[in-house]
Amino acid sequence: MSRSLLALCAALAVASAPAASWAKAPRLTLVITIDSGGTDVFQRARPNFKSGLAQAISQGAYFPHVRYPYAETVTAAGHATLATGASPWRHGVVSNHIINRGTGKAEAIFYDPDHPPLGAPAGLNDSSPANLEAETLADRLRLSTYAHGKAISISGKARASIALAGRLGTAWWFDEETGQFVTGTWYAKEFPAWVKALNEKRPADALFAKQWTPLLPTKALAGEDDRSWETDLYALGRTFPHSVTGGLSAPGRQFYAALASTPLMDDLLVQMAKAAIDGEGLGKDDVPDLLAVSFSPIDRIYHLYGPYSWEVQDALARLDRNVGELIAAAEKAAGKGNVLVAITADHGGAALPEEWLAAGLPAARVSPARLQAGLNEELKKRFGSALCVGIEEVDVYLDDPAIAEKKLDGAAVRRAAAQWLAAQPDIAFAVARDDLYQADGLRGYLPALQRGYFPRRSGDVLMIAREYHVVSDHPTGTSHGTPYAYDALVPLVLYGRNVRPGLYQQEIHATDIAPTVAALMELAPPAMSEGVPRAEAMNGAK
Ligand SMILES: [Zn+2]
């Protein structure tokens, strides 16, 4: 085929795209996730918002109470839920890691040996959406626009970016081995020119040895900077100023990990997002495009220093500026009035258990390694063998091959394990998978566990720690992953085209986010969506 004929075909293909029917949809939709930006931290940080977050809240629709309706509130599950409108029982992304029953090893949920990363070393890491079992908003957009609408996602974490891109969008993430933005071979066989150009500038390396000092005046920061249960990791120290070298004399792996644990990484994500807007021509025509950006550092900062730290307060104030810059870039590309913005979070997070204890609350660290050892003692006594192979958040995995080999009654082993776990003082509830749909709904935990259960990937026994109890083997820092409000409630802010401004105090579900954004984009909801479009936050004009 001649060059001019090819060009003509391309022109016809564009002309036959259903551009006219999308005249009312926003040209560019930004979905912004604050990793670990739960309702508690977000509400407390509001007085410090002056830029993008302030603008979106004051001029948009604000839902402070959006609940993840399942128990294991972690990053991969949260992003998959907000992208698909479904809970893990449908989309299958039950946790960040699952224990492979064949090998007994923990694998990243988006590990796919058939589609390794492009431009980064392969491992047992996240690299493809093959395990995501439900359609995403990005997939729906690509299908509805005959692949003319673009869907790009960007994050510091592969698992967040992959969940947002789904199967038909393109996911980009920061790789902490190479210090570059990479994707997976599922999405691309080679780097497009705009990514190559950005990576060649080594923008991460340009941040080497920078200091993170507070943007906010110290009098605006609540509490103390130096608290003994904060974590000193990657040579960042526990107090301001944080020097970002990773303890190295030149950029390398530890530096990239340090960088990813500071707001400097948010600046880098904005650089990448702006490069995507230019490079992919997002918002340039009437066919809607989607740009999803998941800001990861708040989560790392939260895990190290806790939600009441100076660091989290300052990181959120800085993120407000990043969001402002991103909205301005989107409005410049698509035209003001042609942009829709949705800002939310994948989960919240617990405080440092010791600060809850100091406040007089019954808090504790719950070591999964110690629980596993205790459970194995019990199983050895009753069945002659240590049959628990691992505990991953709420999922307790048993050794199925050993149970089969010893001709044990599997259900009896699982029930014995659940009974022992439920009797432990730190555990609120435990159930064998056999009883997940039959047991009595003790204190309402069963529905949350059912919505998070996906056969083959979930554990054989499911457990929930008590309120204020943090499941972690680390002696410092904190974590998330329970159905309690501090982990399960996040905000949603909608701003821009066709949004009806207001404060909406009713509790909604995180599964409502995808169908709501889809409705505002004039798309049908993703195929497995369980939520509903929040019509109260939409303008009624046809
Ligand atoms: Zn997260």
Image: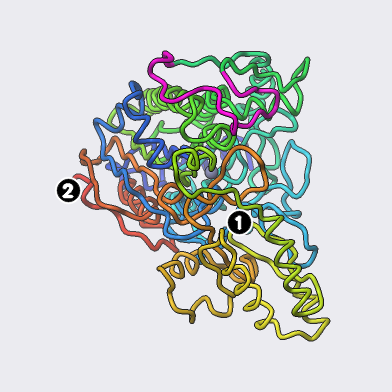
Classify the position of the N terminus by image quarter. Answer: top right
Q: Secondary structure at mark 2?
A: loop
Q: Secondary structure at mark 1?
A: loop
Q: Is the distance from the Cβ of mark 2 to the nearest ligand 1 atom less than 8 Å?
A: no
Q: Nearer the viewer, residue 299 or 501?
A: 299
Q: Kindly report the secondary structure that dominates the magenta region of the rendered protein.
A: loop
Q: Residue 228: x, y in percent?
A: 59, 30
Q: Identify the amino acid type marked 1.
A: Glu
166 w.r.t. 289: above or below: below
Q: Residue 533: x, y in percent?
A: 30, 55
Q: CA distance from mark 1 to mark 2?
A: 43 Å
251 w.r.t. 341: above or below: above
Q: Residues within 10 Å of mark 1 (few under 14, many from 20)?
A: many
Q: Which residue is mark 1?
A: 393
Q: Which residue is mark 2?
A: 540
Q: Is residue 219 magenta?
A: yes
Residue at 50 percent across and 37 percent down: it is: 355
Q: Is residue 461 visible?
A: yes
Q: Is residue 96 left or right of residue 388?
A: left
Q: Identify the amino acid type marked 2.
A: Gly
Residue at 59 percent across and 56 percent down: it is: 95
Q: Is residue 525 magenta?
A: no
Q: Is residue 291 visible?
A: no
Q: Nearer the viewer, residue 112 or 198?
A: 112
Q: Is residue 82 left or right of residue 501?
A: right
Q: Residue 332: x, y in percent?
A: 37, 23
Q: Residues within 10 Å of mark 2 (few under 14, many from 20)?
A: few
Residue numbers of the magenta segment: 216-239
Res 501 → quadrant: top left
